[in-house]
Amino acid sequence: MKQFEYTIQDPLGIHARPAGMLAKLAKSFGDTVVTLSKDGNTVKASQLMKIMAMGIKNGHTITIAAEGPAEDEAIAAMQKFLEENL
Amino acid sequence: MLLLQGKGVSKGVINGPIYFFRRPDTNVNKVHAEDLEAEKARLAEAQAKSIEQLERLAEKCREEAGDEAAVLFETHAMFVEDDDYVETIMDTLADEECNVEFAVQQAGEQFAAMFAAMDDAYMQARAADIRDVTTRILNNLMGVIEGGVDSDVPVILAADDLAPSETLQLDKTKILGFVTAGGSGNSHTAILARTMGIPAICALGDALKPELEGRIAYIDGETGKIALDPDEITLTAFEAKLKKQKELKELLQTMKGQKDVTLDGREMMVYCNIGSPEDVAAVLNNDGQGIGLFRSEFLYLRASDYPTEEEQFQAYKAVASAMGGKRVVIRTLDIGADKQVDYFEMKKEENPALGVRAIRICLNRPEVFRTQLRALYRASAYGKVAIMFPMITSVWEVKECKRACAKVMAELDKEGIPYNADTEIGIMIETPASVFVADALAKEVDFFSVGTNDLTQYTLACDRQANDLGKFFDPHHPAVLRALKMATDAAHAAGIWIGICGELGADLSMLETFLAIGIDELSVSPSSVLPLRAQIRKSIAKTCTLEKLES
């Protein structure tokens, strides 16, 4: 398993649009499972509604983890996405 | 040949196939399902259809309004496929062995409630998105047609009558004209038809049989006649009229860009009445000089819950900026009477036209009023917005409205949100009471606008919705015209302008009387602007008389 931490820069936090894009991306790694955690709560990063329900705001720190055959690729892609969009 | 006779309520002739509006049953009942696999297959089909619709909407939005608006629909498409949402639906299906409609509705409610309970205004507002997506899937499951018309070619839409919320959802590009069994010249179908500039015939009664579906009809919105399988004479007459209509339309195009001024130099402001931001295109196409009545009800009628400040602000801003620096008079919430909205949970009234409606609701529910006023003032930074209050009867009401405005402006100052502090405030003159105290009211506001339908209703004690009052409901009645004169004299004595935003404004036979009374503005359906302009440019104001006020 690989993981990294990221602090949200977007003033709106993780709102609907990036949450949707993030969920779509997280789904694209086949058997590799990508998760998102905040304050001890962990959800699959492909679960759009659950991510939104976490109410992640500007300044919050989240942990992204990936486990499976494509974990390196997934971590790199997620990192890039977060930096560019959130 | 089959001839039907109704009441023509919007002029014009057209021919096309008759299509009956299907009023869907959108009540979801829980039913035991035998074959759960079949239910799942129905869900998959409805999901695919929903996503296809949303992608089309996103594409259309991207072309017309840009990326930001399109993303909303793309997010909706993601909701449709979301794992959690679908899983919840599947769980309900398996546990309850029920129809998929019930499972979808349950899941929608569950997620909407979850978002509504979050302590973040942005996330709370997403509850509406979930409901919207859920409704879309349900509509596709239950075969509800988006836009109301499932036809490749434009049709003549037939119905018993259409409710305001139904007219708003219609795909207007697919409608050539309206024919209804019930309704009257003041019904919402008639108003919509006049806005669109297409023919409408109402009060056809039982003659409008469902068997007519698909038959080619020749309708005349002036005479109220419908012909099916017309004989040669009728057909020739119809075609001649169609040709004349086309020529007249071309002739009226020459009126574009001309001033609304009489031969002796009296200027009239010719504005438009609109019911939603989409109507602005018609205003600009017909060269309207402003908007004299923007009915804000569409925001409330379209929704299943109170529209937010942001939603309202976006709608008002869109209209104000699209009109450039031209005046946009926005009327505050005017529901009650014939326009009911479920979530307001109004008590049933014996006499809704005399009940808690319009400004009375706003003054009773300061929060609803405040939300709308904030949205209006915020929009005032983006164009020439004017605010108009409906159903005024007393000076104290106006004072209370102005206090509410002052409070909102103070809030915006504090929050550093821009607005125009000189936003004009006006009132509707539509009750006899407002005419009797017009001199006192005029001192409080920047303009008057006369709603002739309601003024006629209240002055003559005639229910404007009632079909059989016929000759008794007479907007040309001297009492109504004298009321108009009294209000005009009071307005001018106080140095403010007065307009008419009721249907009477477009009545060309009344133009001379309006000029004689001294009306400053006429706000009419967009399609009436050019004919009215042509008439104004032929008139001589100083020779107009008040003879219609006598007798």
Image: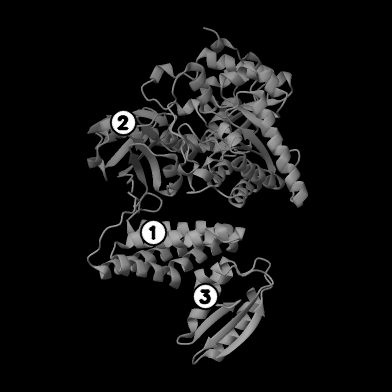
| Circle 2 or circle 3, nearest the eye | 3
Residue B228 is left or right of residue A86, and the answer is left
Q: Secondary structure at mark 3?
A: helix
Q: CA distance from mark 1 to mark 3?
A: 23 Å
- Tell me if I can see residue B26 in this picture: yes
Residue under label 1 = B105
Q: Residues within 10 Å of mark 3 (few under 14, many from 20)?
A: many
- Tell me if I can see residue B255 in this picture: no
Name, please, the residue furthest toward the bottom. Answer: A69
Q: Please state the chain letter of the residue tagged with numbered disc 1 in the rendered image.
A: B
Work out whether residue A16 or residue B492 is closer to the camera in this orientation and state it: A16
Amino acid on which the number 2 mark rests in the picture: Leu
Q: Are marks 2 and 3 on the same chain?
A: no
Which one is earlier in the sequence, the residue at label 1 or at label 2?
Answer: 1
Q: Please state the chain letter of the residue tagged with numbered disc 2 in the rendered image.
A: B
Amino acid on which the number 1 mark rests in the picture: Gln
Task: Tell me the tag on residue A23.
Answer: 3
Amino acid on which the number 3 mark rests in the picture: Ala
The answer to whether the residues at label 1 and label 2 have Cβ atoms under 8 Å apart is no
Q: Are marks 1 and 2 on the same chain?
A: yes
Residue B329 in picture, x, y percent from top left: 63, 37
In the rendered image of this protein, does residue B485 appear above or below residue B415? above
In the rendered image of this protein, does residue B257 appear above or below residue A81? above
Q: CA distance from mark 2 to mark 3?
A: 54 Å
Work out whether residue B406 or residue B256 is closer to the camera in this orientation and state it: B406
Q: Residues within 10 Å of mark 2 (few under 14, many from 20)?
A: many
Residue under label 2 = B204
